[in-house]
Amino acid sequence: MSGIIKTAEQIEGIRESARRLATVIQKVGERVAPGVKAMDLNDYAYELISEYGDKPSFLNYRPDGVKTKYPASLCVSINDEVVHGIPTEDMILQEGDIVTLDCGINHNGYFSDHAVSFPVGVIDPEDQKLINITRESLMVGIKAAKPGNTTGDIGAAIEKFVDGRYGIVRILSGHGVGLAVHEDPFIPNFGTPGTGERLEVGMVIAIEPMLNRGTEIVDALDDDYTFVTADGAQSAHFEHTVLITENGPEILTKI
């Protein structure tokens, strides 16, 4: 199915949603430290979003095929948890962890999506390298998001940059966003240039590479949401909401 081309009015609404979301992730990220409860980060995200008069788009969201609604405002994924970790009271950040904060905002019916992996205190240099390369791979993917290119060009650029150094998660992907939490098109983090859907001016997409220090294979936990690396290796995840413009990609979730 085709991605949705947004109107000028819709783009302004999505841009404001993304601006607010970037501020939320930045402020919540400043509280990442050893000994901090994941639930406290979640509660702070909810507080900030509510103060802005918006709604957390993940809270009570139920994707197709999932039996239960997501119970939190913020996804908190630690170490081998790749995405969609559910924060709990007994989930406490430890020195040396990698934690990914992933959040979405509904601002007057306009949706944005953003994720950042943070080091908790002093971490293993190889884990820091994983974070750095995952962040860089996102920027490489965004650079390929030009009008006339395809979703396959994005994935191919990420895959070429990673060059086998890490496992690229293949069963999870980026997606369209803006008028709903998830929209078409599907945007894998691997692929063949020139394949997939053509990118057009006015499309808004979420690009989100997930890299593992070990295998690309991930398993879903019984909570319906959390994905973990099959071998227990560390994982990192970065995501931006991006607008396709005549002049190339515009990162909307950027401070």
Image (spheres, helix red, strand yellow):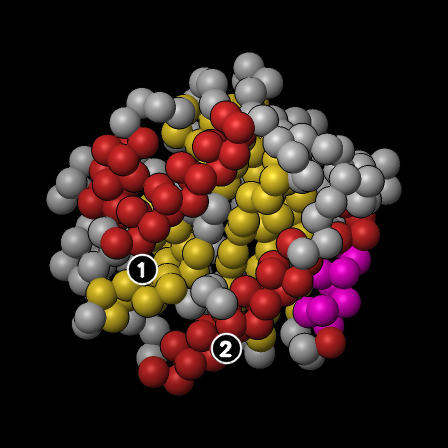
Looking at the rendered image, the disc whose residue lies closer to the viewer, 1 or 2, is 2
Which badge, 1 or 2, is on the more N-terminal residue?
1
Query: Residue pushed farthest right?
Result: 89
Q: Amino acid at mark 2?
A: Glu
216 drawn magenta:
no
Q: Nearer the viewer, residue 1 or 203?
A: 203
Residue ID at (57%, 72%): 20
Query: Residue pushed farthest bottom?
Result: 9
Which residue was labeled with disc 2? 16
- Expressed as whole percent of the image width and height from the top left, the position of residue 224 reads 65, 35
- Expressed as whole percent of the image width and height from the top left, the position of residue 204 reads 36, 64
Q: Nearer the viewer, residue 48 or 125?
A: 125
Which residues, given as a range, are shown in magenta?
Answer: 42-50
Up/down of 70 relative to 53, above or below = above
Residue 21, picture quadrant: bottom right
- Expressed as whole percent of the image width and height from the top left, the position of residue 109 reads 55, 74
Secondary structure under tag 1 reads: loop
Q: Residues within 10 Å of mark 1 (few under 14, many from 20)?
A: many
Q: Amino acid at mark 1?
A: Gly
Residue ID at (34%, 38%): 189
Find the distance from the CA under tag 1 to the CA under tag 2: 20 Å
Tag on residue 3?
A: 1
Residue 229, picture quadrant: top right
